[in-house]
Image: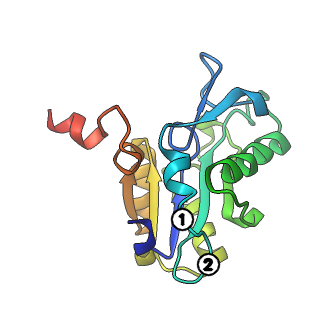
Amino acid sequence: MLERYRLVVFDADDTLRQTTVPGKPCPHAPDEWTLKPGVEDLLKGVRWGEPNAPMFGLASNQDQIAYGLVSLEMAERLLRDLAYAATGNVPGTEALQLCPHAREANCECRKPQPQMLLNVMNHYSVDPEDTLFVGNAEEDREAAVRAGVTFMWAADLFRAEEPSREAQHQE
């Protein structure tokens, strides 16, 4: 399914990883997270960046940086570690986008703004119609709409135990 796209960008928290510390929306240290069920099985089977296979990117709001709860350097490291754990590869820095601003900052990069997605597409020179964004929140879906890319709920892609938001809205 993912091979239909030249680029697949993922949200990080509650899409690819989950924190192991109750009450934390994202990890602050390497030992505070684990991959979500199904992520490794699916993503390690993709030949990321090889001919006729998609390229990998991340786009993650990381407001914990603005609040002084995690450093920019640690947040970047945690995204690199996540990419490696999920795929067995670490793409270039430009493919791993994060917004370090506070939720209330009204910046251009925080999802639902599309800037992080546009940056990853620009890095790989991939058009919106060849890009898929996978996320778990309404702000992820809205960022995909604003960037002109296809969106998929993480629960649908990884066939998680919990129903997708679309399924929840249909009930």
Q: Is residue 81 above or below residue 43?
A: above
Counting from the top left corner in percent of width and height, residue 34 is at: 63, 33
Residue 65 visible in the current orientation: yes
- Residue at 85% across, 44% down: 73
Counting from the top left corner in percent of width and height, residue 156 is at: 34, 47
- Residue at 52% across, 71% down: 7
Which numbered dot is residue 75? none
Residue kind at label 2, given as amino acid type: Glu
Tell me, yes or no, whether the two marked residues, 1 and 2, touch with CB atoms within 8 Å: no
Badge 2: how crowded within 10 Å, few (<14), some, or many (20+)? few
In the picture, residue 132 is in which quadrant? bottom left
Alpha carbons under labels 1 and 2: distance apart: 9 Å
**Quadrant of the rendering where the C terminus is positioned:** top left
Residue kind at label 1, given as amino acid type: Val
Residue 111 visible in the current orientation: no
Which numbered dot is residue 50? 2
Which residue matches tag 1? 46
* Camera-side residue of 66 and 117: 117
* Camera-side residue of 65 and 92: 92
**Kind of element beneath mark 1:** loop
* Camera-side residue of 50 and 112: 50
Counting from the top left corner in percent of width and height, residue 5 is at: 44, 73
In the picture, residue 128 is in which quadrant? bottom left
**Kind of element beneath mark 2:** loop
